Amino acid sequence: MRNMNDLFLHFLRDMYYAERQISKALPKMARAAESAELRQVFTDHREETQHQIERLQQIFEILGKRAQGVTCEAINGLIEECDELMEAMKEPSPVRDAGLIACGQAVEHYEMARYGTLLAWAKLAGQTEAATLLEQTLSEEKTADGLLSKLANTKVNTTAKAA
Ligand code: FE
Ligand code: FE
Ligand code: FE
Ligand code: ZN
């Protein structure tokens, strides 16, 4: 890696790997959720994630590069943490839902960090088409994070506290 283009491509590959791992993890998180609303948020975001993967493929195409992932240990760790939590709390409960929301938000925040950086670099390079695609995805990640916060603050946390 020598220049900003190489660095951009590296993190694009990082996110290509991460999104595919997330698309495998979200159905498990949806099944683990007790709250129907939480299940819906995870299910809807899984659908969005499929489109995010397609957008990344479009960006690889714009750059004339093969769509290829590179292992992201950060997302592996965040998903592992979520798996451990589900293992530690085998039965569905509001408390487990609160934990699932916490795990989900950690994933969304990682994605917001990466897409925020990729967007800044795409703009810097004058890659307007890539920037538009990254903006769409970043906005979906922020919305997913907001929906999880709202669900925690309006319902899940109070129910969990009373449990
Ligand atoms: Fe995503
Ligand atoms: Fe990463
Ligand atoms: Fe996301
Ligand atoms: Zn995501």
Image (tube, grey):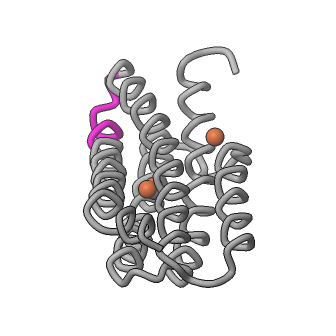
Percent of width and height locating residue 92: 56, 83
Towards the viewer: 27 or 65: 27
**Who is closer to the viewer here, 18 or 152?**
152
- Residue located at (29% from left, 59% from top): 147
Task: Give the left or right position of residue 83, taking residue 127 as reference.
Answer: right
**Lateral position of residue 19 relative to residue 123, left or right:** right
Whether 47 is among the magenta residues is no
Q: Residue 137: where, in percent of width, then height?
A: 34, 50
User: Please, is residue 148 above or below residue 95 in the view?
Assistant: above
* Observer-nearest of 105 and 75: 105
Magenta: predominant secondary structure element?
helix
| Ligand 2 shown in quarter | top right
Residue at figure coordinates x 57%, y 34% from the top left? 9
Region of the chain picked out in magenta, as a range:
126-132
Q: Quadrant of residue 11?
A: top right
Query: In the image, 115: left or right of 143?
Result: right
| As drawn, 101 above or below 131 | below
Q: How many labels does the image show?
A: 0
- In depth, the one of 114 and 148 nearer the eye is 148
| Residue 43, image x, y percentages | 41, 77
149 in relation to 159, above or below: above
Image spot of residue 139 (x, y percent): 28, 47
Q: Quadrant of residue 134?
A: top left
- Residue 44 in which image quadrant: bottom left
**Relative vertical location of residue 4 with respect to residue 53 in this rendering, above or below:** above
Spot the residue most to the front.
162
The residue positioned farthest toward the top in the image shown: 2
Question: For the point 31% across and 36% down, which residue is it?
Answer: 131
Quadrant in which the N terminus is drawn: top right
